[in-house]
Amino acid sequence: MAREAAPQSAATMPLMKKVSTLEPAFISPIISAAESSDILQACGELGPDPSSLHFANRTKNIAFVLCLNGRWFQLNHGFFNQHAGYNDFSGGYRRHYRQLPAAFVDSLPAQRLLHAFKDTYAIPDGKLVLVQVQATNLTPHNQGKCLTGQGIHSDGADCAMLACLRRENVSGARSAVFRDADGDDSVVSPHVLEEGEVLFWRDNEVYHYVEPARLVDDECDGTRAVLIAHYPAMHYITGGQNMKNTLPPSGKHPRYVTEGEGSRLPQ
């Protein structure tokens, strides 16, 4: 079964910035901070992410979605299998997660983000997109740890989008995009994504990375929540490779690092 979102009227559809199809990566403010909060609330309680036992703890819900005639539908499917060629740490097996609730695909701000992704990369109707909403939960004990379990990397898609939904009592966690796996040729310089800002990138042309994060106030915990979308997504169900993404893997994988050498982006 698939869950259906009501279509947006022309009056409620977002005005999208025209983006060059040749642009490998860019950052744009798509939604407001209030809309970011609305999306996160629509995601419900995020479930456990067992893979994060080895880096900064995070929680995650997922959804496979597709658009037909302006309406978004969510499939009933609760795992993905990323090929180990793209992720030699937590790839190569089925990773089961709590699914996003119906309220997510019904959320107008979420639809705005999904339409922005679809329109930017001319994703055809009826093609699957993998959506992950995840929150890194920072404490005095895990601050400074790697946020992803990977270094500079590609996720194995053609294109991807990362939207910041919440950033509370967090410093660092700058995102960057590079043409090379060593991080010497920058496309998007290290940047702190604030709530509502969205990073778009061509995942089969460039690599991305996020640096570790620390607490602003050590007396309180912190949260960094993001929404990530990938297209195409069928190979995340089958566990196969994406023949359109042949980027060689990075040789630098600071998985278990704190803020030691190699874990931070250049200033």
Image (cartoon, helix red, strand yellow):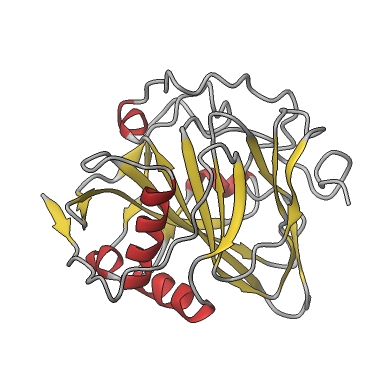
Q: Please state if 153 lies on the left or on the right of 126 as rendered.
A: right
Q: How many marks?
A: 0
Q: Nearer the viewer, residue 142 or 198?
A: 198
Q: Nearer the viewer, residue 246 or 8?
A: 8
Residue 147, given in percent of the width and then of the height, sits at 65, 50
Q: Please state if 68 lies on the left or on the right of 111 as rendered.
A: left
The residue at 37%/21% (across/down) is: 240
Q: Nearer the viewer, residue 133 or 181?
A: 181
The residue at 71%/32% (across/down) is: 253
Tell me which corner region of the image, top left, top right, bottom left or bottom right, holds residue 192: bottom right
The residue at 57%/26% (across/down) is: 88
Q: Nearer the viewer, residue 251 or 203?
A: 203
Residue 143, given in percent of the width and then of the height, sits at 74, 60
Q: Please state if 93 lies on the left or on the right of 188 as rendered.
A: left
Tell me which corner region of the image, top left, top right, bottom left or bottom right, holds residue 263: top right
Task: Identify whether 232 is placed above or below 29.
Answer: above
The residue at 74%/50% (across/down) is: 211
Q: Residue furthest left?
A: 1
Residue 83, given in percent of the width and then of the height, sits at 45, 25
Residue 170, given in percent of the width and then of the height, sits at 71, 69
Task: Identify whether 242 is placed above or below 70.
Answer: above
Q: Please state if 32 lies on the left or on the right of 267 as rendered.
A: left
